[in-house]
Amino acid sequence: AMVKSRYFTKTQEFDGMPKVIDFKIVEEEIDDDLKDKEILGEAIYISVDPYTRYAVYYNVPPGAPIIGFQVIKVTKSKNPKYFVGEKIMVHGGWRTTCKVDDEQVWYKVDKISGIDTSVFVGALGMPGMTAYCGFLEICQPKEGETVFVNGCAGAVGNLVGQIAKIKGCKVIGCCGSDEKIKFAKSIGFDDVFNYKTCKDYPGILKKMAPNGVDCFFDNVGGRMSTDVLACMNVGGRISVCGAISAYNSKTLGQATMVQSYMARKQLLMRGFGVGQFKDKFPEALKHMIQWIQEGKLKIHETTTKGFENTPQAFIDMLSGGNIGKAVVKV
């Protein structure tokens, strides 16, 4: 039999910041006659994430479904690992009903007391794995060191800051509004500034980190990120997670040269994609769950209701409208 599904595609290439008219819903019918290992499921939560902005631009032609993570409830299964009624976190895209196989499944959403299902597209999903692995593996923070995180009220940044506090570091952040500063301080950041209103970026950083910065987790890129290098200590580590400052701009931002800082201060700068740390996910999940249950890691979400509002949630997130993780409740 055929099952109805709806998915979002783009109607045209993005021109700078995506607009609602760049997206449309396509209705299709999916055959529920499953092959071995396939699963059919209904979306419960859909994730909107910064990486989707460039991934869709480069890899998803108009007409094809927009990619992304979601939690689905299994409605039919020919996969011995997943049963009807179970919830799983999959890379199923912006769609209401999806058919996936092992390739697209990240993991089962276990029933964990006190933890909502939505957390599996956030702190226990791709952003959480990004924060845990990207920060701990690359920055290797030591107790007492100073950590700087930009985009510190976002899905990944807020978790990096909290993990750094758990590891006994001093943590400084920057973000784009006073409301976000209040949020970042409420989850344990020692000092936070507003990058939009501060006149002297390196100056304020030097004031907040008088002993220099040892670890820098970079979500933003561009000129301001290079300015941070001037404040780093010898042997500092920089984890390059993303460059959201450039995702919606038509020209690449002009940044000062990094090489002189890097040579003089013996800095290590390393970029990563979360997929390369897949073998670390079980350990990461175990610790993240434990920290959430112990109250050491606080969860904050900005939730949009309704599948049809997914593009608007995405655009809001790209323009800094979310605090913590942006999720869509289908």
Image: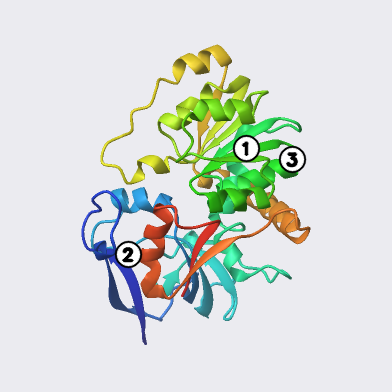
| Residue at point 40%, 20% (across, down) | 257
| 327 to the left or right of 95 | right
Callout 3: SS:
loop
**Rendered location of residue 260, percent (x, y):** 47, 14
| Mark 2 vs mark 1, CA separation in Å | 38 Å
Q: Position of residue 86 (x, y in %)?
A: 60, 76
Q: Nearer the viewer, mark 1 or mark 3?
A: 1
| Mark 3 neighbour density, 10 Å: few (under 14) some (14–19) many (20 or more) | some
Q: Determine whether the residue tagged by mark 1 lies in a helix, strand or loop.
A: strand
Q: Residue at x 49, y 30 (%)?
A: 201
Q: Amino acid at mark 2?
A: Pro
Residue 120 sits in which quadrant? bottom right
| Residue corresponding to mark 2 | 65
281 with respect to 292 (left or right): left
Q: Amino acid at mark 1?
A: Ile
> Height in image: 235 above or below 249?
above
Q: Is residue 278 at all visible to an observer of this figure?
A: no
**Residue furthest toward the bottom?**
1
Residue 307 in the image: state x and y as whole percent. Answer: 40, 74
Tag 3 and tag 2, C-beta contact below 8 Å: no
- Spot the residue most to the left: 12
Q: Residue furthest top?
A: 264
Residue at 43% over, 60% down: 68
Q: Earlier in the sequence, mark 1 or mark 3?
A: 3
Q: Quadrant of residue 236?
A: top right
Disc 3 marks which residue? Answer: 167
> Which residue is denoted by mark 1 in the rendering?
172
Residue 276 position within the rendered picture, expressed as x and y whole percent measured from the top left: 53, 43
